[in-house]
Image (spheres, rainbow, N blue to C red):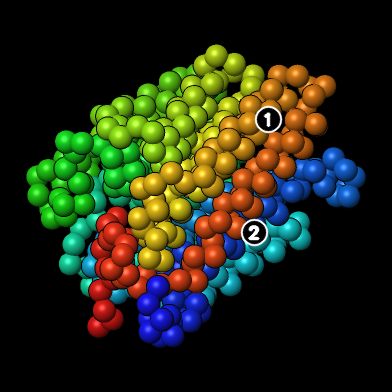
Amino acid sequence: MNPARETSRPSYISLCPAEPFRIFFPLAVLVGISGVSLWPLFFSGIHKFYPGIMHSRMMIEGFLGGFVIGFLGTAMPRLLSAPPLRGWETWTLVVLHLTVAGLHIGHQLLLGDTVFAVQLILFGVFLLRRARHATDLPPPGFVLVGMGYLAGLVGTLLWLGGMNGWVSGSAMMLGGLWLNQAFVLLLILGVGTFLLPRFLAIEGIRPLDEERRASQEWVLRAVTAGSVGVAILLSYWMETAYAAVNAAAVVRGSCVLAYLLFIVPIHRTSKPGRTVPMAVNIALASLVLGLAFPLFWPGQRVAALHIIFLGGFSLITFTVATRVVLGHSGYGHLFRTRLPVLLGVIALLLIGTALRVIGDFFPEQRTGNLNWASYLWMGAAAMWGLAILPKVRLPDVGDENHAPVSAAMKPAAPRP
């Protein structure tokens, strides 16, 4: 690296407001490790409470929610060619994020969910403010990103309403499913329309971000994405209102598989052998397998969820986050090489997923398997964090020795 550039490097704190991933990704990893550690602490007798709900909230609102806000807070202004987040906006979201995690650790479920809803509302407001300055439309698949955001917000509000007796038990359960599942699932599908063809090096696919005007093609793609999102959201309603678990699984799994095959499409990977396509394919296969799992083992819904979360959501989150961090720190060229750290993450998450699922089929092994699955997930998160997260301190200096580092995101527009 050029010494002159090294001396003029902006401080880490000054980089965070316009690129929130730099602060949210490290926080999300720490919250995730805390949330997973609850199980070994419980089984060792250190924690006396059963951490089921606390664990799920730490992982959804803290771990995955942190990555969502960090990614979208960085990407959306760029995609809209709008100004980045301001300092007070980013740091407000950070304080709320830490507050959510602290409240859940302190057994304050209702307050934690309430602050999370406030965080989502403010985040939506901040992004809508960018839309006033937008010169481009987002990719059409980002209709699903908006639906995922609403699923998380409305799901949280329905859950809170049920806990306070304001809505029916069925509506409360629907809110729980939207928050815990649809929130991230729809976000992954929406962002995946934009990123996965790049990650998988799919040939013959015109980059979807080139269609950024309100053309007939953009509208058609947006309507298609929205229809898939509506069907997925309704599948959870079928599950809670009519106990139609199998029918809901068929609708949900079919929609996801069809979207990935025909809209992305994942089956046309053209450059096998690279770490990133491998990670994405494994994550998406885990996602589809987990969604289809209840059709074959309807009594093992928790096992199915952990296939989705460990092998699917976690792996694709680490993969996308790797692209973001490397691409914004001057190391984008590494994303097209063999990444040993990502190979290690794949191995640990897959072994952890297998142990977690086996534990549900063999109750006598459940405690040991759950502990080992927890250790493996924490190991994967720590390995990834130690290898990748130090680069969040580095700006993209445009080193001439590096390939373009931010092809997946347009440069942020200057402040008006």
What residue is rendered at 65% in x and 43% in y?
A: 377
Which part of the image, by quadrant, shows the C terminus? bottom left
Q: Earlier in the sequence, mark 1 or mark 2?
A: 2
For the point 43% across and 40% down, the residue is: 275
Viewer-proximal residue among 415 and 325: 325
Three-letter amino acid code at disc 2?
Leu
Asked which quadrant contains residue 185, the reply is top left
Residue 206 picture location, percent across and down: 16, 43
> Tag 1: residue type?
Arg
Instruction: Tell me the distance, in whole angstroms, between the alpha carbons under discs 1 and 2.
Output: 21 Å
Residue at 52% in and 27% down: 290
Q: Is residue 337 visible?
A: yes
50 or 198: nearer the viewer: 198
Residue 2 placed where, x, y %? 37, 77
Q: Which residue is mark 1?
A: 356
Left or right: 230 in relation to 169: left
User: Where's residue 1, x and y in %?
Assistant: 40, 73
Q: Note whether residue 125 is visible.
A: no
The residue identified by callout 2 is 30
Crowding at mark 1 (Cα within 10 Å: few <14, some 14-19, many 20+): many
